[in-house]
Image (cartoon, rainbow, N blue to C red):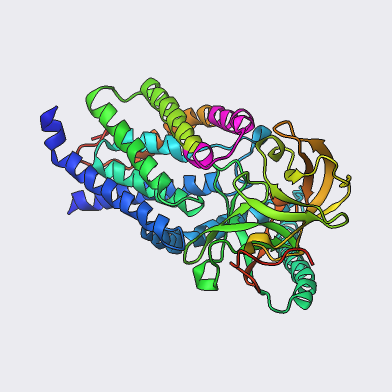
Amino acid sequence: MYYSKKNILHSGAVILIILLFSLFQNTAGILPAPFGARAFLLIPLAVYIGMFERSVKGALFGAFIGILWDISSAKDGYFALMMFLTTFFCSLMISYLMRENFVTAFVLTLFCLAVNISIYILVFYTFSGVKNISPFIFRFYIPSFIYTLILSPFQYYLIKAIYKTVKTTGEYAYD
Amino acid sequence: MQRFFRSSKVKFAGLIIAALLSGILFAAFTNSSSSFFTSIVSVVFSPLDKAAAAVSRYADAFKISFRSSSVYVDKIEELEKELNENTQKLADYEKMKMKIKDYETILELKKRNPDFELCYGMVISRDAADAGSSFVLDVGSADGVSVNDPVICSDNVVGIIKKVNTTTSVALTVLDARLNIGAYEVRTGEKGIASGSAKLQKDGLLKLSGLKSTTAIVSGGIVSTSGAGGIFPSGIIIGTVTTVEDDVADTSSYATVKPACNIAELTGVFVITSFPGQGEKNVSLIE
């Protein structure tokens, strides 16, 4: 019984974090936008949840992150699938190949950001027939990539602190 | 390696991927372009988006001044409370004023086009990953909104509805390179295609392409929808011409157009849910 209550509290806390970051990312005016860049906060969030959860449950949280992002996206289902795969990939990396620390978190964030943005540009611009997309890449996506990377260490330590506070028993990073 | 792929974790992950892919296929083949997962989650969580947008707008309008005095502490607290209440009332008043202004301009449009059916929506969020400044409205299929419904603001074109959930919808703006609108310049009658451009988007401009190399369009000309394609009704203003230049790709010219609406600062828009000729591809053009 005690284990279930802790589990519920833990899941509730994770869902709350996801909602908060979704609102921060998708509501105009909450975060500053230097030179028009935007912070894609949900991608590092998916990475860190995948790292700290280390299970299929983490991947389900990733799908939830993507579904919330899909509400404001013009093409449905894309972010649900990508965030699920991002979280699943990161949980596998931490389970089998890497240790969980700031360096691996940064490396995984950098890799997942680059892959997600690249695939987004391919699917939503190149395959949609939009010509001459280099201004989008150099004036928006690269600045946004850098901006998100700059914010990611703060996000990492915040998520880590929350996971340490609302930890539960089971196959998690902080037992 | 074989044991890993046969494990229950991977099988469960495969089931989830299959469910998500079926959602994507469902969205692709239905009229709303929205999957059942997103529709369910949007009904539950879109009020949070609305609340966050309201908080963001309130924070912009919120001003507070502090006075310090050790003698009149109670009086100061009372005055601060009164100030907060008046500031909130002022913010509400400004919001209502904006809404009334929108309704007044739309009234003129409605008088000219009594067959238009309009639905008012507030901008509640946007897709951070979309460089084309798409946004989310707080109206959806429950309010009669459908995919490809035009979106206007103060009698000017803003964009088009691209995806509809039950209580929210996503609109692409005229600055988006994926949106093409049949248009014409009012003074010369010359027709073209208005669309976004990656090069011009940062400056908040769009492109009117397909003009003759000997075009008579000049800076200051008004660009309006032609009604071609049945997506937009004819006669809705898109913007004003800023420059006319030669296209490097061929022998035609193009004009850069400044949208009539300030897309970046939109708060409330109207969706035209029904108009005569909607969806008819061979609609007669300029009147």
Residue B217 locus on image (x, y percent): 86, 47
Residue B262 locus on image (x, y percent): 75, 51
Q: In this rendering, would B131 be left or right of B81?
A: left
Residue B149 visible here = yes
| In front of the other: A108 or B96 | A108
Q: In this rendering, would B228 be left or right of A107?
A: right
| In front of the other: B9 or B187 | B187
Q: Residue at horizontal 84%, vertical 43%?
A: B242
Residue B154 visible here = no
Q: Residue at horizontal 29%, vertical 41%?
A: A58
Q: Quadrant of residue B177?
A: top right
Magenta includes A145?
yes
Residue B249 locus on image (x, y percent): 69, 32
Which image quarter holds the C terminus of chain B? bottom right
Magenta includes A153?
no
- Figure label count: 0
Residues in magenta, as a range:
A123-147
Task: Report the magenta stretch's main SS.
Answer: helix
Q: In this rendering, would B94 be left or right of B232?
A: right
| In front of the other: B40 or A133 | A133
The residue positioned farthest toward the top in the image shown = A103
Q: Residue at horizontal 58%, vertical 39%?
A: A130
Q: In which quarter of the image is residue B269?
A: bottom right
Which image quarter holds the N terminus of chain B? top left
Residue A85 locus on image (x, y percent): 33, 38
